[in-house]
Image (tube, rainbow, N blue to C red):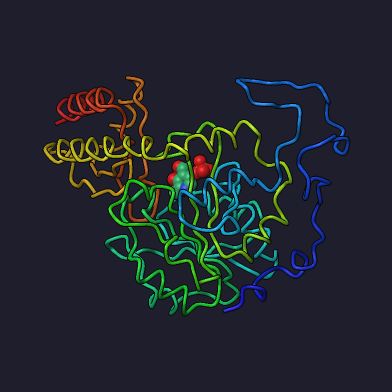
Amino acid sequence: MDVTGLIRPNILSLEPYHSAREKIQEGILLDANESPYTQEWQGIGLNRYPDPYQRKLRSAIAQYLGVRMDNVLAGAGSDEVLDWIFKVFCQPGKDRVAVAEPTYGMYRVTANIFGIPCFEFPFDKRFDFSAERFLEVVPAHTKVLFLCSPNNPTGNLLDRDEILQLSRKWEKIVVVDEAYIEFAEHSSLVADLDGIPNLIVLRTLSKAFGRAGIRLGYAVASPEVIAHFLKVKAPYNLSTLTMENGCQVLGESENQLRRVQEIRRERERVAAQLREIPQIEQVFSSQTNFLLFRSPQASLICDRLLEKQIVVRDRSSLTGLVNCIRVSIGTSSENDLFLDELQRIVKGNL
Ligand SMILES: Cc1ncc(COP(=O)(O)O)c(C=O)c1O
């Protein structure tokens, strides 16, 4: 299929901002009104603008994923990549998007910011996605579907074949947010991108790589989609510090990802202990670094934990998640403190 027809006409014809350093990045640099005096922090030169094409970083990401550099582009967190998707594909007053719910709230918030109507498509009872069911009900003028796999806050992976089937049948944009994929048992959809130009995968360094503070998320997609993202992104969206640090952690990904094993082990330990607590009705299985559990005392549990400076997330207001709490997996001692306090709270309220 051809994605060109899905791109907003003003973006197709947009002449983007050009930097004079497209071809040459080193030499006598008198083109950008920077300070000529070297300013360094931790050995990183900061007086020059960062590379708008993110060449070093994109090549590090491409190497980590086994794709080409023109398949990736990075934003200040994957939240910034959401902005590009709306800018490139969604025409206000005409297009709409669909979000498979319950899920991460930023897809809907971003749609609201851009003034694009959002169709809420409910997952089935097992929080899975069915391509056939979606195709039966999707409203006209829906341009983009947002899926999250493994899903936040339910923790499950979506059926890969359903996603691929939809991407092949539905000639619109399918976005799959894989923020938590490194914690999952199955591999990323990045391996399936070839030949599916309408599929966009979102990834981030905020979770398994432990770099939420540097703000670095990225899109993996066909070169055509990436070329249009490059047109709409702010030229200097990522700081030199962020890009350097990103390259460094990606270069030691094996070390970084060892932590993922620890978190998975802790996740299963915490889940087993939660399942022992009679006042907890359900602990959902998880392919992420968090757990979702249900208790009739959910709101009281959140309030009491907060009094002890333990912050968890009450997800009860989301569709299908009455009385559900999401808790991130912390260090072993943090998890023990959480479990001890939780037990004290529920016992006191028998
Ligand atoms: C599903 C999902 N996607 C994206 C993000 C945010 O990613 P980033 O930090 O790269 O903006 C989160 C954060 O909680 C998330 O749960």
Q: Who's the residue at 56% across and 46% down the image?
A: 79
Question: Which percent across, then down, holds residue 192?
Answer: 43, 67
Q: Position of residue 176 (x, y in %)?
A: 46, 59
Q: Residue at x 39, y 57 (%)?
A: 188
**At which x and y percent is residue 94?**
68, 70
Q: Quadrant of residue 162?
A: bottom left
Instruction: Return the x and y of residue 267 as percentages of the image width and height.
Output: 24, 39
- In the rendered picture of this protein, how many numbered marks are placed on residues? 0
The residue closer to the viewer here, 199 or 50, is: 50
**Image quadrant in which the N terminus is located:** bottom right
Name the quadrant containing residue 341. top left
Residue at 60% across / 41% down in the picture? 76
Q: Residue at x 69, y 48 (%)?
A: 53
Q: Nearer the viewer, residue 249 or 101?
A: 249
Q: Is residue 249 left or right of residue 116?
A: left
Q: Quick one: which residue is furthest to the front in this view?
A: 27
Q: Nearer the viewer, residue 98 or 231?
A: 231
Q: Quadrant of the C terminus?
A: top left
Looking at the image, is 283 positioned above or below residue 126?
above
Look at the picture and state if 82 lies above or below 237: below
Please state if 249 lies on the left or on the right of 244 as rendered. Answer: left
Res. 50 image quadrant: top right
